[in-house]
Image (cartoon, helix red, strand yellow):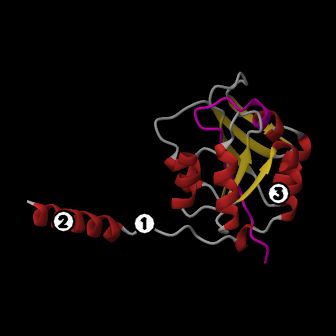
């Protein structure tokens, strides 16, 4: 049975990413999302000029807002996360163990976000695309093939502190 992604959460973070906002509302993008089972979208649009509120597009309900104190609940409730390539948003989705599609903002200068997305895709943790390739990416990727992001190993930090304190004690 093919996995269905009924609830989708989309975030642009604190930035302005109007091209992604416009891309999501294109009928062809809505159709691509419907093909993977999407029925509900929660869409955090940041500083975009787009009007917030509830929309219905071709049977898909889209709840649009600018900002919240935390997007953690939106991520937890989602079956799929589509995000800009900000490190914070990517890590939050990966730590929540959600399938993640990152959309690169090609208008950014010195695009370090592309480097992050490329490496995380190479490591098998997410897929990335641009606004121009969003629809085709949704149609061809298999999110079930993604590898869960490893949980942090806090013992490494504790070992580092222990070693650092031991060195300091030997110096004194």
The image shows a total of numbered marks equal to: 3
Residue 146 visible in the current orientation = yes
Q: Which mark is residue 138?
A: 3
- 98 relative position to 151: left or right: right
Of circles 1 and 2, which is in front?
A: 2
Residue 43 higher or lower than 50, as above or below:
below
Label 1: how many Cα within 10 Å (few below 14, some 14–19, many 20+): few
Left or right: 131 as drawn, with respect to 102? right
Residue at 8% x, 59% y is: 172
Residue 83, percent across and down?
66, 47
Where is residue 43? Give x, y as percent.
Answer: 67, 40
For the residue pair 35 and 112, the one nearer the viewer reads as 112
Q: Which residues are magenta?
A: 1-20
Q: How many C-alpha atoms fall within 10 Å of the one at disc 3: few (<14), some, or many (≥20)?
A: some
Q: Which mark is residue 167?
A: 2
**7 sits left or right of 160 in the view:** right
Which residue was labeled with disc 1? Answer: 152
Secondary structure predominantly adopted by residues drawn in magenta = loop
Q: Quadrant of residue 38?
A: bottom right
Q: Please, what secondary structure does the residue beneath circle 1 have?
A: loop
């Amino acid at each position: 049975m093919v996995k269905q992604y009924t609830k989708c959460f989309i975030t642009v973070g604190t930035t302005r990413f109007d091209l992604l906002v416009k891309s999501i509302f294109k009928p062809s993008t809505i159709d691509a999302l419907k093909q993977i089972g999407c029925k509900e979208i929660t869409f955090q649009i940041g500083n975009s000029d787009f009007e917030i509120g509830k929309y219905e597009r071709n049977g898909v309900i889209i709840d649009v807002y600018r900002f919240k104190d935390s997007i953690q609940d939106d991520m937890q409730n989602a079956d799929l996360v589509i995000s800009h390539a900000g490190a914070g948003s990517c890590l939050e989705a990966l730590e929540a163990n959600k399938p993640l599609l990152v959309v690169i903002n090609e208008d950014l200068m010195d695009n370090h976000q592309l480097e992050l997305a490329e490496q995380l895709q190479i490591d098998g943790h997410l897929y990335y695309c641009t606004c121009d390739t969003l629809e085709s990416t949704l149609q061809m990727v298999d999110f079930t093939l993604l590898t869960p992001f490893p949980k942090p190993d806090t013992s490494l930090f504790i070992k580092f502190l222990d070693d650092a304190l031991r060195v300091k004690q030997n110096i004194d």
